[in-house]
C-alpha cells in the first residue's frame, strides 16, 4: 500500500502485509474513516485496519462470529464511526464497535445463483450453486415459508451447476470452480470427487470457472461435463467416456494463464479460456448433442459423439469468438435450436438470442431493441412453442410470438441478472435463477400459455390454470420466524386468473364462485389492472351461523373444506359477466382414502348443520325474550300480565343458558355450554381431512341427541308458555309474541 500527500505526485510505501496486497485486481477498496483519518480499512481476503495512517495493519477479530472471506465493500457511518457495514462474498455484516465484532444480516435476499435445477419430489426441491457460497438444495414449500434453515449444503467452493439424480434421489452432483465435481450421498452425508482426469500423455484439461455439468431431465441416466473435450458418464461419475475431440478454437494466445497480466500472477481457473461452457442434449433425439464454448464455437453431433459438425461459420449475426452462454434444442422440432451469446468482456453489451430452423445452416438474431442487457439463457416453452423466455444481465424477457416481439417481465422479478431458467413439466412452474436476488418461481405458466390472440382480443376472459388441489394447508403452521429471511410458499388456495383488455376505470370487478347447483359460495374482490389478474379462493364452504353469546365463537369463521369436482366461476365487470369453470382435485400426496375423506365431509357438514340448528333455537329464544321486554312498558298497568311477562323473560334466560355460556370470560376461559362444546368439536373435525376419531363420531351422535332434547324442551315452551302469554296479550289488546321461523332466520345476518 502506498500513500500520497500531494495529490498523487509522490508516493510513499506504507505497508505490504499479505492481506493488504492480496490480489489487488480483485480486492481494490481502501476506505478511510470519515472522522478519524488515521483509521484506514482494507477489505481483502479478510478485513485489515490501521490506526496510524497505513504504517501498520492489524486483522479484525472474528471472536464475535465468523465473517465470510473475500471482502469487497465497506461503509462507515459518517456520524457514528463505530457503525460499519461490510459486504463480502457471503453477504452483508454489521459492526457497532469499529469491526471488533460483526453480526450477519441474514434477512437480506441477495444470493447469487449461477444455475438452477429441480427434482421430482413432492413438493419439489430446487438446487443451485452460489458465488463463493457452495451448492445448496432447498424446498419450494415449507411451514411458515422457506427459511435459511430449510436449505441443505450439497457442495463446496464457488457453487455453479448442481444436478439431482432423478433416478436415485439419494445422490446429488455438484460442480465448483475449475471443474471440481463431487457426488453427494444424502444418506451418509458423504462427498466423492468424480472429476475426470487427463489420460496418460493427454494434454492438460482446460476447465472453465463455470464448467457445465449437464443432464437432460428427459434422459437422466447420462451426465455430461466439458473441459475442451466433452465427457459422459452413465454410472454416477465412476467412469467417464470422452466423446469428442477438442471442440474449442484451442488458440494458444488465449492460454497463457500462468503468465497473467505481469503485475500480479493469478491463476484461479477463472482465467481459463478455450473451454466448453454450454452443453445440451435434444429432448427429441438422445444422440443429438450441442456444445458451445467460451471462444465462440458451436458444434453438434447426431450420433452420440462419434462425429461432430462445426456450425460457427454459419453464425453471421454474432461477432466472431463471442462467448456461447446457453443452448436450447427445441422440444418441438429436431432441426430447430436456440442459443445465446454474450460479448460483454469486449465491450459489446448487445443481446444475442439466435435461432436456427435448419440444424445450424442459417441463423437469425431474435433479440429486438426491447431486450436489454447481454444474454445468459434462452428457453422455449414445452407446451406453447411460440412462448420463449430469455434471461439477460438486466432481467427476464418473454416473447409470445416465437421471438418476433419481446416484453420485459417485471411483475416482482427485479432488474437483476437472470442466469438460468427451468420449466418444471409436472407443476408448470418457471424457475428463475438470478445473480443477486436469489431464486424466483412463477407459479403455473398455464395462463400465459393460453394468452392466444383470440383471448387478447376479448374485453375480459377467465384463463385456464393447472388443476387446483384441495387442501386445508400443509405449510401454514409452525412458530413464527424469530429472524432471517423467509421466502413465500406458493398459495395452497385455489387460484383463478382472469384477463382484462383494458384497465377498469369505473365500477367494481369481482369473481364469484358457485357450486354445481348454482349456490353462491364466495364473492372475491378483484383487481382492475390491464392484463393478467389473479385472485384466490380458500376452497371453503360458508361457515355456519352460530348462536350469539357473550363470547366470540370462532366456528362462525370456519367453513368446511369444499369437495372435489367442478365449480362455476363468474367474472363480473360492471354489468358484464364472463363465465368459466374450475376443477378441484384431491391433493396427489393426500394420505387419506376417498372413503375417509367422504366420512370427514359428512361429519363436518352434520356438525355444521347442528351449529345452525342451535343458532336458530338460541335466536328464537332471544327474539321471544326481547319481544317480551318490549311489551313490559305497555303492560305496566296490568300486574298479572307484567308478572307473566317477567316470568316468561326469566324462562327464556334459563333456556338460553342451556344453549350458550352467559357468564363473561376471556377467549380461553369461561363456562362451557352446548354451543361451546359443539363448536369445539366442529372446528376439530373441520381442520382435518381424514377420518374423524371414533370418539369424535360418538360425540357427534351424542350432540344429535342433546340437540333433539333441547329442541323438544323448547317446543314445550312454545306450545305452553308462549301460547299462554299470547292469550293474555290478546286479552290486553297487545300484539302477540311471534316465534321466529327458520326462513326468517336464514335472512338474518348475525
Image (tube, rainbow, N blue to C red):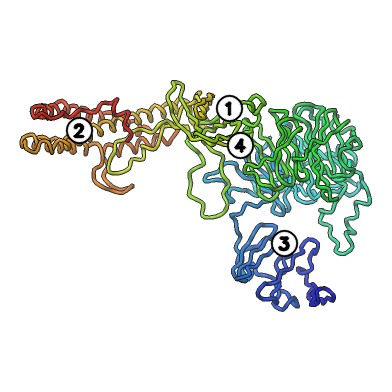
**Could you tell me which secondary element the residue under label 3 belongs to?**
strand
> In which image quadrant can residue 402 be found?
top right
Callout 2: SS: helix
Of badges 1 and 4, nearer the viewer stands 1
Q: Nearer the viewer, residue 364 or 47?
A: 364
- Measuring from the top left, give residue 10's x and y in whole percent: 84, 76
| Nearest-to-viewer mark from 2 and 4 | 2
Can you tell which quarter of the image residue 408 is in?
Answer: top right
Q: Which residue is mark 2?
A: 624
Of tags 1 and 3, which is closer to the observer?
Answer: 1
Other-residue count near label 2 (Cα within 10 Å), few / some / many at <14 / 14–19 / ≥20: many
Residue 504 location, x and y as percent?
55, 34
Mark nearer the N terminus (3 vs 2) = 3
In primary-sequence order, the first of circles 2 and 4 is 4
Q: Is residue 481 left or right of residue 401?
A: left
Earlier sequence position, callout 1 versus callout 4: 4
Marks 1 and 2, how far apart at CA: 50 Å
Q: CA distance from mark 1 to mark 4?
A: 19 Å
Q: Callout 3: few (<14), some (14-19), or many (20+) C-alpha neighbours within 10 Å?
A: many
Residue 493, relative to residue 15: is it above or below?
above
Q: Residue at x 81, y 62 (%)?
A: 25
What secondary structure is marked by label 4? loop
Q: Are marks 1 and 2 in contact (CB under 8 Å)?
A: no
Residue 543: quarter of image: top left
Kindly identify which residue carries mark 3: 72
Image disc number at residue 443: 4
In the structure shown, which secondary structural element does the residue marked by tag 1 occupy? Answer: strand
Q: CA distance from mark 3 to mark 2?
A: 78 Å
Q: Which mark is residue 76?
A: none
Amino acid at each position: 500500500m502506498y500513500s500520497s500527500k500531494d495529490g498523487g505526485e509522490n508516493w510513499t510505501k506504507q505497508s505490504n502485509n499479505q492481506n493488504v496486497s492480496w490480489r489487488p485486481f480483485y480486492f481494490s477498496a481502501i476506505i478511510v474513516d470519515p472522522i478519524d483519518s488515521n483509521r484506514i480499512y482494507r477489505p481483502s481476503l479478510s478485513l485489515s485496519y490501521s490506526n496510524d495512517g497505513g504504517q501498520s495493519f492489524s486483522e479484525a477479530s472474528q471472536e464475535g462470529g465468523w465473517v465470510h472471506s473475500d471482502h469487497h465493500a465497506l461503509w462507515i457511518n459518517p456520524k457514528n464511526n463505530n457503525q460499519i457495514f461490510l459486504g463480502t462474498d457471503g453477504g452483508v455484516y454489521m459492526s457497532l464497535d469499529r469491526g471488533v465484532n460483526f453480526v450477519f444480516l441474514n434477512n437480506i435476499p441477495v444470493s447469487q445463483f449461477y444455475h438452477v435445477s429441480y427434482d421430482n419430489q413432492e413438493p419439489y426441491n430446487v438446487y443451485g450453486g452460489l458465488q463463493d457460497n457452495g451448492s445448496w438444495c432447498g424446498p419450494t414449500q415449507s411451514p411458515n415459508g422457506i427459511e435459511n434453515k430449510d436449505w441443505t449444503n450439497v457442495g463446496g467452493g464457488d457453487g455453479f451447476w448442481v444436478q439431482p439424480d432423478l433416478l436415485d434421489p439419494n445422490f446429488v452432483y455438484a460442480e465448483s470452480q475449475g471443474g471440481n465435481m463431487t457426488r453427494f450421498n444424502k444418506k451418509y452425508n458423504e462427498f466423492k470427487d468424480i472429476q475426470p482426469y487427463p489420460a496418460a500423455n493427454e494434454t492438460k484439461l482446460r476447465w472453465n470457472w463455470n464448467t457445465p455439468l449437464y443432464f437432460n431431465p428427459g434422459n437422466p441416466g447420462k451426465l455430461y461435463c466439458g473441459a475442451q473435450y466433452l465427457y459422459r458418464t452413465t454410472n454416477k461419475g465412476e467412469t467417464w467416456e470422452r466423446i469428442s475431440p477438442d471442440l474449442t478454437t484451442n488458440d494458444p494466445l488465449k492460454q497463457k494463464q500462468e503468465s497473467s497480466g505481469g503485475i500480479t500472477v493469478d491463476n484461479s481457473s477463472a482465467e481459463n479460456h478455450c473451454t466448453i461452457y454450454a452443453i445440451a442434449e435434444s429432448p427429441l433425439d438422445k444422440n443429438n448433442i450441442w456444445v458451445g464454448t467460451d471462444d465462440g464455437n458451436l458444434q453438434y453431433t447426431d450420433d452420440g459423439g462419434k462425429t461432430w459438425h462445426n456450425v460457427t461459420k454459419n453464425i453471421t449475426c454474432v461477432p466472431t469468438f463471442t462467448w456461447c452462454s446457453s443452448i436450447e434444442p427445441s422440444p418441438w422440432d429436431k432441426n430447430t435450436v436456440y442459443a445465446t451469446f454474450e460479448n460483454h468482456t469486449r465491450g459489446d453489451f448487445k443481446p444475442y438470442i439466435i435461432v436456427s430452423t435448419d440444424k445450424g445452416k442459417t441463423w437469425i438474431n431474435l433479440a429486438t431493441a426491447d431486450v436489454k442487457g447481454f444474454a445468459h439463457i434462452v428457453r422455449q416453452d414445452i407446451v406453447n412453442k411460440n412462448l420463449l423466455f430469455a434471461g439477460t444481465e438486466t432481467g427476464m424477457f418473454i416473447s409470445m410470438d416465437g421471438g418476433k416481439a419481446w416484453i420485459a417481465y417485471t411483475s416482482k422479478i427485479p432488474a437483476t441478472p437472470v442466469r438460468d431458467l427451468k420449466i418444471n413439466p409436472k407443476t408448470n412452474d418457471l424457475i428463475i435463477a438470478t445473480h443477486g436476488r436469489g431464486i424466483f418461481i412463477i407459479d403455473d405458466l398455464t395462463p400465459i400459455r393460453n394468452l392466444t390472440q383470440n383471448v387478447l382480443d376479448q374485453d375480459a376472459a377467465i384463463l385456464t390454470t393447472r388443476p387446483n388441489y384441495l387442501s386445508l394447508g400443509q405449510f401454514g403452521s409452525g412458530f413464527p420466524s424469530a429472524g432471517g429471511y423467509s421466502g413465500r410458499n406458493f398459495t395452497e388456495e385455489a387460484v383463478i386468473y382472469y384477463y382484462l383488455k383494458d384497465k377498469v376505470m369505473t365500477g367494481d370487478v369481482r369473481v364469484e364462485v358457485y357450486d354445481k347447483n348454482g349456490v353462491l359460495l364466495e364473492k372475491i374482490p378483484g383487481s382492475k389492472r390491464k392484463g393478467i389478474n389473479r385472485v384466490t379462493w380458500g376452497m371453503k364452504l360458508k361457515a355456519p351461523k352460530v348462536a350469539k353469546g357473550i363470547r366470540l365463537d370462532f366456528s362462525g369463521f370456519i367453513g368446511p373444506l369444499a369437495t372435489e369436482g367442478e365449480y362455476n366461476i363468474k367474472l363480473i365487470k360492471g354489468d358484464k359477466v364472463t363465465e368459466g369453470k374450475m376443477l378441484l382435485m384431491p391433493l396427489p400426496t393426500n394420505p387419506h382414502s376417498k372413503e375417509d375423506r367422504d366420512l370427514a365431509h359428512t361429519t363436518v357438514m352434520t356438525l355444521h348443520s347442528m351449529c345452525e340448528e342451535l343458532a336458530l333455537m338460541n335466536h328464537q329464544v332471544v327474539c321471544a325474550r326481547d319481544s317480551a321486554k318490549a311489551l313490559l312498558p305497555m303492560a305496566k298497568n296490568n300486574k298479572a300480565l307484567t308478572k307473566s311477562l317477567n316470568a316468561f323473560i326469566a324462562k327464556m334466560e334459563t333456556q338460553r343458558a342451556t344453549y350458550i355460556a352467559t357468564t363473561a370470560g376471556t377467549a380461553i376461559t369461561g363456562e362451557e355450554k352446548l354451543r361451546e362444546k359443539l363448536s369445539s368439536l366442529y372446528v376439530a373435525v373441520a381442520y382435518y381431512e381424514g377420518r374423524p376419531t371414533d370418539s369424535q363420531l360418538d360425540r357427534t351422535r351424542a350432540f344429535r341427541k342433546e340437540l333433539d332434547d333441547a329442541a323438544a324442551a323448547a317446543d314445550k315452551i312454545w306450545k305452553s308458555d308462549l301460547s299462554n302469554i299470547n292469550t293474555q296479550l290478546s286479552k290486553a289488546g297487545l300484539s302477540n309474541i311471534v316465534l321466529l321461523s327458520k326462513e326468517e332466520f336464514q335472512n338474518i345476518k348475525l
